[in-house]
Image (spheres, helix red, strand yellow):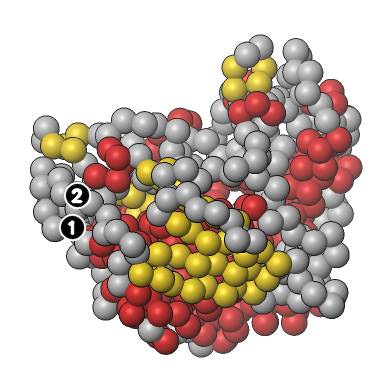
Protein backbone atom coordinates (compact mmCIF):
# COMPACT_ATOMS: atom_id res chain seq x y z
CA UNK A 1 0.00 0.00 0.00
CA UNK A 2 1.27 3.48 -0.83
CA UNK A 3 1.94 5.75 2.14
CA UNK A 4 -0.17 8.87 2.64
CA UNK A 5 1.52 11.40 4.94
CA UNK A 6 -1.63 12.24 6.89
CA UNK A 7 -2.93 10.93 10.19
CA UNK A 8 -5.95 9.27 8.62
CA UNK A 9 -6.58 7.99 5.12
CA UNK A 10 -9.72 9.12 3.28
CA UNK A 11 -12.28 6.45 4.17
CA UNK A 12 -14.96 4.90 1.98
CA UNK A 13 -17.59 2.45 3.23
CA UNK A 14 -19.60 0.66 0.53
CA UNK A 15 -22.06 -2.21 0.70
CA UNK A 16 -23.11 -4.05 -2.44
CA UNK A 17 -26.73 -5.20 -2.26
CA UNK A 18 -29.13 -7.21 -4.36
CA UNK A 19 -31.82 -4.54 -4.02
CA UNK A 20 -32.10 -0.98 -2.78
CA UNK A 21 -31.85 -0.54 1.00
CA UNK A 22 -31.64 2.27 3.50
CA UNK A 23 -28.11 3.58 3.64
CA UNK A 24 -27.38 3.20 7.38
CA UNK A 25 -24.39 5.49 6.96
CA UNK A 26 -22.87 3.43 4.17
CA UNK A 27 -22.95 3.96 0.42
CA UNK A 28 -25.04 1.35 -1.38
CA UNK A 29 -24.02 -0.11 -4.70
CA UNK A 30 -27.06 -1.96 -6.01
CA UNK A 31 -26.83 -4.82 -8.50
CA UNK A 32 -29.10 -3.73 -11.32
CA UNK A 33 -28.58 -0.02 -10.64
CA UNK A 34 -24.95 0.93 -10.01
CA UNK A 35 -23.82 -2.46 -11.37
CA UNK A 36 -25.71 -3.09 -14.60
CA UNK A 37 -25.35 -6.39 -16.44
CA UNK A 38 -25.93 -6.74 -20.16
CA UNK A 39 -27.81 -10.02 -20.57
CA UNK A 40 -26.46 -10.87 -24.02
CA UNK A 41 -22.88 -10.20 -22.99
CA UNK A 42 -23.36 -12.09 -19.74
CA UNK A 43 -24.58 -15.10 -21.71
CA UNK A 44 -21.28 -15.09 -23.61
CA UNK A 45 -19.65 -16.16 -20.30
CA UNK A 46 -22.15 -18.97 -19.69
CA UNK A 47 -21.56 -22.39 -21.22
CA UNK A 48 -23.51 -25.61 -20.70
CA UNK A 49 -22.96 -25.47 -16.93
CA UNK A 50 -23.91 -22.46 -14.82
CA UNK A 51 -21.13 -21.52 -12.39
CA UNK A 52 -22.28 -19.11 -9.66
CA UNK A 53 -18.67 -18.30 -8.75
CA UNK A 54 -18.27 -16.71 -12.19
CA UNK A 55 -21.14 -14.32 -11.52
CA UNK A 56 -19.66 -13.54 -8.10
CA UNK A 57 -16.28 -12.75 -9.67
CA UNK A 58 -17.95 -10.30 -12.03
CA UNK A 59 -19.75 -8.63 -9.12
CA UNK A 60 -16.49 -8.39 -7.15
CA UNK A 61 -14.70 -6.80 -10.11
CA UNK A 62 -17.54 -4.34 -10.61
CA UNK A 63 -17.71 -3.46 -6.91
CA UNK A 64 -13.97 -2.83 -6.77
CA UNK A 65 -14.25 -0.53 -9.79
CA UNK A 66 -17.17 1.33 -8.19
CA UNK A 67 -15.18 2.02 -5.01
CA UNK A 68 -11.98 2.92 -6.85
CA UNK A 69 -13.71 5.51 -9.01
CA UNK A 70 -16.06 6.88 -6.35
CA UNK A 71 -13.59 8.16 -3.74
CA UNK A 72 -11.26 10.94 -4.85
CA UNK A 73 -7.64 10.40 -3.90
CA UNK A 74 -6.06 12.87 -1.43
CA UNK A 75 -4.22 15.90 -2.78
CA UNK A 76 -1.17 14.99 -0.70
CA UNK A 77 -0.45 11.28 -0.76
CA UNK A 78 -2.27 8.58 -2.63
CA UNK A 79 -3.91 5.88 -0.51
CA UNK A 80 -7.49 5.51 0.69
CA UNK A 81 -9.07 3.25 3.30
CA UNK A 82 -11.77 1.30 1.45
CA UNK A 83 -14.29 -0.91 3.26
CA UNK A 84 -16.43 -3.08 0.99
CA UNK A 85 -19.13 -5.66 1.66
CA UNK A 86 -20.22 -7.98 -1.17
CA UNK A 87 -22.92 -10.68 -1.33
CA UNK A 88 -21.77 -13.98 -2.87
CA UNK A 89 -23.19 -17.46 -3.41
CA UNK A 90 -20.48 -19.24 -1.40
CA UNK A 91 -19.56 -17.09 1.57
CA UNK A 92 -17.32 -19.77 3.08
CA UNK A 93 -15.19 -19.94 -0.05
CA UNK A 94 -14.76 -16.19 -0.42
CA UNK A 95 -14.11 -15.69 3.30
CA UNK A 96 -11.50 -18.46 3.42
CA UNK A 97 -8.06 -17.28 4.46
CA UNK A 98 -6.38 -18.30 1.20
CA UNK A 99 -8.88 -16.50 -1.04
CA UNK A 100 -9.17 -13.41 1.13
CA UNK A 101 -5.41 -13.00 1.49
CA UNK A 102 -4.82 -13.43 -2.24
CA UNK A 103 -7.57 -10.96 -3.13
CA UNK A 104 -6.36 -8.26 -0.74
CA UNK A 105 -2.75 -8.75 -1.84
CA UNK A 106 -3.70 -8.22 -5.48
CA UNK A 107 -5.91 -5.20 -4.82
CA UNK A 108 -3.57 -3.36 -2.47
CA UNK A 109 -0.56 -3.96 -4.72
CA UNK A 110 -2.38 -2.77 -7.84
CA UNK A 111 -4.17 0.30 -6.50
CA UNK A 112 -1.95 1.37 -3.61
CA UNK A 113 -4.96 1.51 -1.26
CA UNK A 114 -5.87 -0.20 2.01
CA UNK A 115 -8.70 -2.64 1.23
CA UNK A 116 -11.02 -4.27 3.76
CA UNK A 117 -13.41 -6.65 1.99
CA UNK A 118 -16.10 -8.69 3.73
CA UNK A 119 -18.31 -11.27 2.04
CA UNK A 120 -21.87 -12.14 3.07
CA UNK A 121 -24.27 -14.78 1.80
CA UNK A 122 -26.66 -13.71 -0.92
CA UNK A 123 -30.32 -13.43 0.04
CA UNK A 124 -31.35 -14.96 -3.25
CA UNK A 125 -29.46 -17.06 -5.76
CA UNK A 126 -28.83 -15.51 -9.15
CA UNK A 127 -30.86 -17.16 -11.90
CA UNK A 128 -28.89 -19.77 -13.82
CA UNK A 129 -27.92 -19.05 -17.40
CA UNK A 130 -26.57 -21.37 -20.07
CA UNK A 131 -25.78 -20.98 -23.75
CA UNK A 132 -24.54 -24.35 -25.02
CA UNK A 133 -24.34 -23.08 -28.59
CA UNK A 134 -21.25 -20.98 -27.85
CA UNK A 135 -18.33 -21.87 -30.09
CA UNK A 136 -14.73 -22.18 -28.88
CA UNK A 137 -11.86 -22.38 -31.37
CA UNK A 138 -10.85 -26.00 -31.86
CA UNK A 139 -7.62 -26.90 -30.10
CA UNK A 140 -7.17 -23.52 -28.41
CA UNK A 141 -4.59 -23.56 -25.63
CA UNK A 142 -4.38 -19.91 -24.59
CA UNK A 143 -6.45 -16.84 -23.76
CA UNK A 144 -5.49 -13.44 -25.13
CA UNK A 145 -7.17 -10.24 -23.89
CA UNK A 146 -8.20 -8.35 -26.99
CA UNK A 147 -9.09 -4.70 -27.51
CA UNK A 148 -8.93 -2.10 -30.25
CA UNK A 149 -5.28 -1.45 -29.33
CA UNK A 150 -2.22 -2.10 -31.46
CA UNK A 151 -0.44 -4.53 -29.13
CA UNK A 152 -3.44 -6.82 -28.64
CA UNK A 153 -4.10 -7.00 -32.38
CA UNK A 154 -0.45 -7.70 -33.16
CA UNK A 155 0.25 -10.18 -30.38
CA UNK A 156 -2.93 -12.16 -31.01
CA UNK A 157 -1.82 -12.76 -34.59
CA UNK A 158 1.83 -13.41 -33.77
CA UNK A 159 1.00 -15.79 -30.91
CA UNK A 160 -1.51 -17.80 -32.93
CA UNK A 161 1.05 -18.19 -35.69
CA UNK A 162 3.93 -19.18 -33.42
CA UNK A 163 1.91 -21.51 -31.23
CA UNK A 164 0.34 -23.02 -34.35
CA UNK A 165 -2.89 -22.94 -32.38
CA UNK A 166 -6.09 -20.96 -32.31
CA UNK A 167 -6.47 -18.51 -29.44
CA UNK A 168 -9.54 -17.63 -27.43
CA UNK A 169 -9.90 -13.88 -27.65
CA UNK A 170 -11.47 -12.11 -24.70
CA UNK A 171 -12.66 -8.71 -25.77
CA UNK A 172 -11.91 -5.89 -23.34
CA UNK A 173 -13.32 -2.41 -23.64
CA UNK A 174 -14.10 -2.57 -27.33
CA UNK A 175 -16.45 -0.05 -28.87
CA UNK A 176 -18.05 -2.89 -30.83
CA UNK A 177 -21.35 -4.20 -29.53
CA UNK A 178 -21.98 -7.13 -31.82
CA UNK A 179 -21.44 -10.79 -30.96
CA UNK A 180 -19.19 -12.32 -33.62
CA UNK A 181 -20.11 -15.67 -35.10
CA UNK A 182 -18.01 -18.72 -35.94
CA UNK A 183 -19.50 -21.45 -38.11
CA UNK A 184 -22.92 -19.94 -37.47
CA UNK A 185 -22.48 -20.07 -33.68
CA UNK A 186 -21.95 -17.20 -31.26
CA UNK A 187 -18.43 -16.77 -29.88
CA UNK A 188 -17.85 -16.41 -26.14
CA UNK A 189 -16.32 -13.55 -24.16
CA UNK A 190 -17.28 -10.90 -26.69
CA UNK A 191 -17.26 -7.96 -24.29
CA UNK A 192 -17.20 -7.03 -20.62
CA UNK A 193 -20.72 -8.01 -19.48
CA UNK A 194 -21.39 -5.14 -17.09
CA UNK A 195 -21.18 -1.39 -16.64
CA UNK A 196 -20.60 0.51 -13.42
CA UNK A 197 -22.45 3.76 -12.85
CA UNK A 198 -22.23 6.40 -10.17
CA UNK A 199 -25.25 7.69 -8.31
CA UNK A 200 -23.86 11.13 -9.12
CA UNK A 201 -23.42 12.55 -12.59
CA UNK A 202 -19.80 11.42 -12.81
CA UNK A 203 -17.30 9.48 -10.75
CA UNK A 204 -14.95 11.66 -8.70
CA UNK A 205 -11.68 9.76 -9.28
CA UNK A 206 -10.13 9.32 -12.73
CA UNK A 207 -6.95 7.33 -12.02
CA UNK A 208 -8.93 4.05 -12.23
CA UNK A 209 -6.06 1.81 -11.14
CA UNK A 210 -8.50 -1.06 -10.59
CA UNK A 211 -8.94 -1.34 -14.34
CA UNK A 212 -6.14 -3.89 -14.38
CA UNK A 213 -8.00 -5.99 -11.82
CA UNK A 214 -11.16 -5.93 -13.93
CA UNK A 215 -9.35 -7.02 -17.07
CA UNK A 216 -7.42 -9.71 -15.22
CA UNK A 217 -10.59 -11.08 -13.61
CA UNK A 218 -12.32 -11.23 -17.00
CA UNK A 219 -9.37 -13.09 -18.53
CA UNK A 220 -9.20 -15.45 -15.53
CA UNK A 221 -12.91 -16.23 -15.80
CA UNK A 222 -12.46 -17.04 -19.48
CA UNK A 223 -9.52 -19.34 -18.72
CA UNK A 224 -11.54 -21.12 -16.03
CA UNK A 225 -14.72 -21.56 -18.08
CA UNK A 226 -12.83 -22.67 -21.19
CA UNK A 227 -10.43 -24.86 -19.14
CA UNK A 228 -7.34 -23.11 -20.50
CA UNK A 229 -4.14 -22.73 -18.49
CA UNK A 230 -2.37 -19.85 -20.27
CA UNK A 231 -3.22 -16.16 -20.48
CA UNK A 232 -1.13 -14.11 -22.89
CA UNK A 233 -0.46 -10.49 -21.91
CA UNK A 234 0.02 -8.59 -25.18
CA UNK A 235 1.70 -5.49 -23.77
CA UNK A 236 5.14 -4.65 -25.14
CA UNK A 237 8.02 -3.61 -22.91
CA UNK A 238 7.53 0.14 -22.69
CA UNK A 239 3.86 -0.21 -21.77
CA UNK A 240 4.30 -2.97 -19.19
CA UNK A 241 7.55 -1.94 -17.51
CA UNK A 242 7.74 1.78 -18.25
CA UNK A 243 5.16 3.08 -15.73
CA UNK A 244 6.84 1.52 -12.64
CA UNK A 245 10.27 2.62 -13.90
CA UNK A 246 9.17 6.23 -14.44
CA UNK A 247 6.18 6.81 -12.15
CA UNK A 248 4.20 10.04 -12.17
CA UNK A 249 5.27 12.41 -9.39
CA UNK A 250 3.33 11.78 -6.14
CA UNK A 251 1.49 8.86 -7.74
CA UNK A 252 1.73 5.19 -6.85
CA UNK A 253 3.41 3.13 -9.63
CA UNK A 254 1.09 1.67 -12.26
CA UNK A 255 1.45 -2.13 -12.26
CA UNK A 256 -1.61 -3.11 -14.30
CA UNK A 257 0.39 -5.02 -16.96
CA UNK A 258 3.33 -5.98 -14.78
CA UNK A 259 4.45 -9.54 -13.89
CA UNK A 260 4.37 -8.68 -10.19
CA UNK A 261 0.63 -8.04 -10.42
CA UNK A 262 -0.23 -11.05 -12.59
CA UNK A 263 1.72 -13.26 -10.18
CA UNK A 264 -0.73 -12.20 -7.47
CA UNK A 265 -3.72 -12.88 -9.72
CA UNK A 266 -2.43 -16.39 -10.41
CA UNK A 267 -2.52 -17.04 -6.67
CA UNK A 268 -6.07 -15.68 -6.43
CA UNK A 269 -7.37 -17.94 -9.21
CA UNK A 270 -5.65 -20.97 -7.72
CA UNK A 271 -7.24 -20.34 -4.31
CA UNK A 272 -10.68 -19.34 -5.57
CA UNK A 273 -11.16 -21.65 -8.54
CA UNK A 274 -8.64 -24.42 -7.92
CA UNK A 275 -7.51 -23.60 -11.44
CA UNK A 276 -3.83 -23.00 -12.14
CA UNK A 277 -3.36 -20.24 -14.68
CA UNK A 278 -0.04 -18.98 -15.98
CA UNK A 279 0.36 -15.49 -17.42
CA UNK A 280 2.91 -15.17 -20.21
CA UNK A 281 4.51 -12.02 -21.62
CA UNK A 282 5.77 -12.87 -25.12
CA UNK A 283 6.60 -9.23 -25.94
CA UNK A 284 7.86 -8.01 -22.57
CA UNK A 285 11.45 -7.60 -23.77
CA UNK A 286 10.49 -6.00 -27.09
CA UNK A 287 9.63 -2.42 -27.88
CA UNK A 288 6.21 -1.64 -29.28
CA UNK A 289 7.89 -0.68 -32.56
CA UNK A 290 9.55 -4.09 -32.80
CA UNK A 291 6.22 -5.79 -32.12
CA UNK A 292 4.49 -3.72 -34.79
CA UNK A 293 7.21 -4.43 -37.35
CA UNK A 294 6.97 -8.19 -36.78
CA UNK A 295 3.18 -8.03 -37.02
CA UNK A 296 3.40 -6.30 -40.40
CA UNK A 297 6.20 -8.41 -41.88
CA UNK A 298 5.42 -11.86 -40.45
CA UNK A 299 1.63 -12.20 -40.53
CA UNK A 300 -0.96 -12.04 -43.28
CA UNK A 301 -3.11 -9.56 -41.33
CA UNK A 302 -0.40 -7.03 -40.48
CA UNK A 303 -2.19 -4.26 -42.34
CA UNK A 304 -4.85 -4.25 -39.62
CA UNK A 305 -2.59 -2.11 -37.42
CA UNK A 306 -4.00 0.95 -39.15
CA UNK A 307 -7.46 0.13 -37.75
CA UNK A 308 -6.29 0.12 -34.14
CA UNK A 309 -6.92 2.81 -31.52
CA UNK A 310 -4.36 3.82 -28.90
CA UNK A 311 -5.66 7.14 -27.51
CA UNK A 312 -6.68 7.53 -23.88
CA UNK A 313 -8.82 10.61 -24.45
CA UNK A 314 -12.61 10.41 -24.38
CA UNK A 315 -14.50 11.15 -27.58
CA UNK A 316 -15.94 14.44 -26.39
CA UNK A 317 -12.47 15.92 -25.88
CA UNK A 318 -10.99 15.32 -29.34
CA UNK A 319 -13.52 15.91 -32.15
CA UNK A 320 -12.48 17.63 -35.39
CA UNK A 321 -15.35 18.79 -37.60
CA UNK A 322 -17.64 16.44 -35.71
CA UNK A 323 -15.43 13.38 -36.24
CA UNK A 324 -13.57 11.60 -33.46
CA UNK A 325 -9.80 11.41 -33.80
CA UNK A 326 -7.00 10.16 -31.60
CA UNK A 327 -5.47 13.12 -29.79
CA UNK A 328 -1.91 12.38 -30.91
CA UNK A 329 -0.20 13.83 -27.84
CA UNK A 330 -1.14 11.73 -24.78
CA UNK A 331 1.39 9.15 -23.59
CA UNK A 332 -0.38 6.33 -25.44
CA UNK A 333 -0.57 8.27 -28.71
CA UNK A 334 3.06 9.37 -28.43
CA UNK A 335 4.17 5.78 -27.90
CA UNK A 336 2.10 4.76 -30.91
CA UNK A 337 3.64 7.45 -33.14
CA UNK A 338 7.12 6.58 -31.92
CA UNK A 339 6.47 2.90 -32.68
CA UNK A 340 5.09 3.53 -36.15
CA UNK A 341 8.26 5.48 -36.95
CA UNK A 342 10.49 2.78 -35.44
CA UNK A 343 8.75 0.13 -37.55
CA UNK A 344 9.45 2.12 -40.71
CA UNK A 345 5.77 2.80 -41.32
CA UNK A 346 3.66 5.90 -41.84
CA UNK A 347 0.04 6.85 -41.28
CA UNK A 348 -2.09 9.80 -42.40
CA UNK A 349 -1.65 12.93 -40.29
CA UNK A 350 -5.43 13.31 -40.01
CA UNK A 351 -5.45 10.20 -37.83
CA UNK A 352 -4.74 12.64 -34.99
CA UNK A 353 -5.95 15.98 -33.68
CA UNK A 354 -2.31 17.04 -33.35
CA UNK A 355 -1.44 16.49 -36.98
CA UNK A 356 1.95 18.21 -36.96
CA UNK A 357 4.45 17.35 -34.24
CA UNK A 358 7.10 19.35 -36.13
CA UNK A 359 5.33 22.63 -35.38
CA UNK A 360 7.40 25.07 -33.34
CA UNK A 361 4.68 25.54 -30.75
CA UNK A 362 2.06 23.26 -29.28
CA UNK A 363 -1.02 25.13 -30.49
CA UNK A 364 0.11 25.27 -34.13
CA UNK A 365 0.40 21.49 -34.27
CA UNK A 366 -3.35 20.95 -33.91
CA UNK A 367 -5.68 20.41 -36.85
CA UNK A 368 -7.39 23.44 -38.33
CA UNK A 369 -10.86 23.69 -36.86
CA UNK A 370 -10.01 22.09 -33.52
CA UNK A 371 -11.32 24.49 -30.89
CA UNK A 372 -10.71 22.65 -27.63
CA UNK A 373 -7.04 23.39 -26.98
CA UNK A 374 -6.99 23.44 -23.19
CA UNK A 375 -4.29 23.66 -20.51
CA UNK A 376 -5.17 20.07 -19.59
CA UNK A 377 -4.35 18.83 -23.11
CA UNK A 378 -1.06 20.69 -23.00
CA UNK A 379 -0.25 19.04 -19.67
CA UNK A 380 -1.13 15.64 -21.15
CA UNK A 381 1.24 16.33 -24.04
CA UNK A 382 4.10 17.40 -21.79
CA UNK A 383 3.56 14.41 -19.49
CA UNK A 384 3.46 11.95 -22.40
CA UNK A 385 6.60 13.37 -23.96
CA UNK A 386 8.51 13.54 -20.69
CA UNK A 387 7.57 9.96 -19.78
CA UNK A 388 9.07 8.57 -22.98
CA UNK A 389 12.04 10.92 -22.72
CA UNK A 390 12.81 9.98 -19.12
CA UNK A 391 12.52 6.30 -20.02
CA UNK A 392 15.04 6.92 -22.81
CA UNK A 393 17.51 8.41 -20.34
CA UNK A 394 17.54 5.65 -17.74
CA UNK A 395 20.11 3.26 -19.19
CA UNK A 396 22.74 5.96 -19.82
CA UNK A 397 22.61 7.59 -16.40
CA UNK A 398 24.56 6.27 -13.38
CA UNK A 399 21.90 7.93 -11.22
CA UNK A 400 19.38 5.30 -12.27
CA UNK A 401 21.52 2.17 -11.96
CA UNK A 402 19.86 1.30 -8.65
CA UNK A 403 16.41 1.91 -10.15
CA UNK A 404 17.09 -0.50 -13.00
CA UNK A 405 18.65 -3.06 -10.67
CA UNK A 406 15.72 -2.91 -8.22
CA UNK A 407 13.09 -3.21 -10.94
CA UNK A 408 14.98 -6.05 -12.61
CA UNK A 409 15.11 -7.95 -9.31
CA UNK A 410 11.35 -7.56 -8.86
CA UNK A 411 10.71 -8.81 -12.40
CA UNK A 412 13.13 -11.70 -11.90
CA UNK A 413 11.31 -12.87 -8.79
CA UNK A 414 7.92 -12.75 -10.50
CA UNK A 415 9.11 -14.51 -13.67
CA UNK A 416 11.54 -17.04 -12.17
CA UNK A 417 14.59 -15.43 -13.79
CA UNK A 418 18.00 -14.71 -12.33
CA UNK A 419 18.58 -11.10 -11.33
CA UNK A 420 21.44 -10.87 -13.80
CA UNK A 421 19.33 -12.13 -16.71
CA UNK A 422 16.46 -9.77 -15.90
CA UNK A 423 18.81 -6.79 -15.57
CA UNK A 424 20.48 -7.59 -18.89
CA UNK A 425 17.12 -7.89 -20.66
CA UNK A 426 15.75 -4.72 -19.08
CA UNK A 427 18.85 -2.68 -19.90
CA UNK A 428 18.77 -3.90 -23.50
CA UNK A 429 15.10 -2.93 -23.80
CA UNK A 430 15.81 0.55 -22.43
CA UNK A 431 18.72 1.08 -24.82
CA UNK A 432 16.59 0.11 -27.81
CA UNK A 433 13.83 2.43 -26.60
CA UNK A 434 16.42 5.20 -26.31
CA UNK A 435 17.57 4.67 -29.89
CA UNK A 436 14.00 4.63 -31.22
CA UNK A 437 13.05 7.74 -29.25
CA UNK A 438 16.08 9.74 -30.36
CA UNK A 439 15.50 8.82 -34.02
CA UNK A 440 11.81 9.75 -33.75
CA UNK A 441 12.41 13.13 -32.12
CA UNK A 442 15.19 13.97 -34.57
CA UNK A 443 12.83 13.18 -37.45
CA UNK A 444 10.53 15.98 -36.23
CA UNK A 445 13.19 18.62 -36.84
CA UNK A 446 15.15 20.96 -34.54
CA UNK A 447 12.27 23.41 -33.99
CA UNK A 448 9.60 20.88 -32.99
CA UNK A 449 7.75 21.64 -29.77
CA UNK A 450 8.36 17.99 -28.85
CA UNK A 451 12.12 18.52 -29.26
CA UNK A 452 11.92 21.58 -27.02
CA UNK A 453 10.45 19.49 -24.20
CA UNK A 454 13.09 16.73 -24.27
CA UNK A 455 16.35 16.50 -22.36
CA UNK A 456 17.64 13.12 -23.59
CA UNK A 457 17.95 13.95 -27.29
CA UNK A 458 21.22 15.68 -28.18
**Which residue bears the numbered disc 1?**
50
**Residue 120 drawn at (x, y percent):** 41, 71
**Which residue bears the numbered disc 2?**
129
* Residue 321 in view: yes
Front residue of 275/312: it is: 275
Q: CA distance from mark 2 to mark 1?
A: 6 Å
Do tag 2 and tag 1 residues touch (Cβ < 8 Å)?
A: yes
Residue drawn 78% across the image and 49% down it: 383
Residue drawn 60% across the image and 69% down it: 83
Q: Is residue 160 left or right of residue 363?
A: left
Query: In the picture shown, does residue 314 fall above or below 5?
Result: above
Residue drawn 81% across the image and 26% down it: 373
Q: Residues within 10 Å of mark 1 (few under 14, many from 20)?
A: some
Front residue of 455/232: it is: 232
Residue drawn 24% across the image and 44% down it: 43
Q: Is residue 295 left or right of residue 353?
A: left
First in sequence: mark 2 or mark 1?
Answer: 1
User: On the image, which quarter does residue 239 sit in?
Assistant: bottom right
Front residue of 96/22: it is: 22
Q: Is residue 290 left or right of residue 313?
A: left
**Residue 302 drawn at (x, y percent):** 38, 38
Circle 1 — which element? loop
Amino acid sequence: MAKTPTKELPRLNVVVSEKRKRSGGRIHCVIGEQIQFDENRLLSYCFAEWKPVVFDMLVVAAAVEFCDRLQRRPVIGWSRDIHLEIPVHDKELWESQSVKAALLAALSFLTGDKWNVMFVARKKEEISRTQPSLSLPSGAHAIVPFSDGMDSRAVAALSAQRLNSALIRVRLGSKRHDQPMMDGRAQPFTNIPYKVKSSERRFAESSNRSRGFKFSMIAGIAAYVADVKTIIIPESGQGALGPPLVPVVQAYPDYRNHPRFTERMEKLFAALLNHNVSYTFPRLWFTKGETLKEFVTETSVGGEWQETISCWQQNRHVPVDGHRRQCGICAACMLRRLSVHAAGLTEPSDQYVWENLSASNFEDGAAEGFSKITPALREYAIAGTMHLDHLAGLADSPRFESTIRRNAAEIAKAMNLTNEDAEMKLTSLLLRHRDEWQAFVESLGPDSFIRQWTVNVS
